[in-house]
């Protein structure tokens, strides 16, 4: 079933923030915490510093009404520069790739594609963009 969630980027304190949110909402993480050291290196990127391997690549916490709050650390070693305004994405999880393609194309009109929809190592069809109003959108379609 299609869903929408909110994706938060943090400088280096995602774990601290999500442990706080977990205590506030009294819920459990929706999946195991994925850390940058758990995944393969990024092509074209230098090796990840040892200190960054423990940072959170993905975390997910149900809050209210089936809404998921998701997050990641955005380390500068991976080219991120975190500013207020680029720290929140609306995450769309369409049911089909065709739906993902259509929504992505429509939202990209007049905006800026950050990462074109593509196959990712975790098995998703994934991409990001900023629409013409400056709103950031993330797509994560698990359908094949």
Image (cartoon, rainbow, N blue to C red):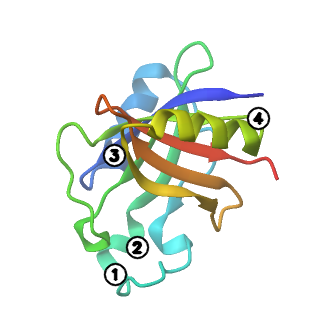
Local secondary structure at mark 4? loop
From this view, report whether residue 31 is shown above or below residue 110.
below
Closest to the observer, 100 or 22: 100
Q: CA distance from mark 4 to mark 3?
A: 25 Å
Please tell me whether mark 2 or mark 3 is closer to you in this view.
3
From this view, report whether residue 99 is shown above or below residue 41.
above
Name, please, the residue furthest toward the top. Answer: 65
State the mark number for residue 50. 1
Q: CA distance from mark 2 to mark 4?
A: 32 Å
Name, please, the residue furthest toward the left. Answer: 83
Q: Which residue is mark 3?
A: 9
Sort mark 1 into few (<14), some (14-19) or many (20+) by Cα contacts within 10 Å. few
Please tell me whether mark 2 or mark 4 is closer to you in this view.
4
Sort mark 4 into few (<14), some (14-19) or many (20+) by Cα contacts within 10 Å. some
Please tell me whether mark 4 or mark 3 is closer to you in this view.
4
Residue 129, horizontal then vertical, whole percent: 42, 45
Q: CA distance from mark 3 to mark 1?
A: 20 Å
The residue that appears at 55% across and 40% down in the rendered structure is: 105
Q: Earlier in the sequence, mark 2 or mark 4?
A: 2
């Amino acid at each position: 079933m299609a869903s929408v969630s909110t994706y938060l980027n943090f400088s280096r304190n995602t774990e601290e923030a999500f442990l706080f949110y977990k205590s506030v909402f009294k819920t459990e993480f929706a999946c195991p915490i994925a850390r940058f050291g758990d995944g393969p290196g990024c092509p074209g990127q230098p090796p990840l510093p040892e200190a960054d391997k423990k940072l959170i690549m993905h975390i997910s916490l149900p809050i209210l009404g089936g809404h998921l709050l998701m997050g990641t650390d955005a380390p500068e070693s991976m080219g991120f520069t975190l500013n207020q305004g680029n720290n929140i994405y609306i995450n769309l999880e369409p049911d089909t790739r065709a739906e993902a393609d259509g929504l992505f194309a429509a939202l990209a009109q007049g905006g800026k594609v950050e990462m074109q929809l593509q196959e990712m190592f975790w098995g998703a069809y994934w991409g990001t963009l900023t629409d013409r109003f400056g709103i950031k959108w993330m797509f994560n379609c698990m359908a094949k």
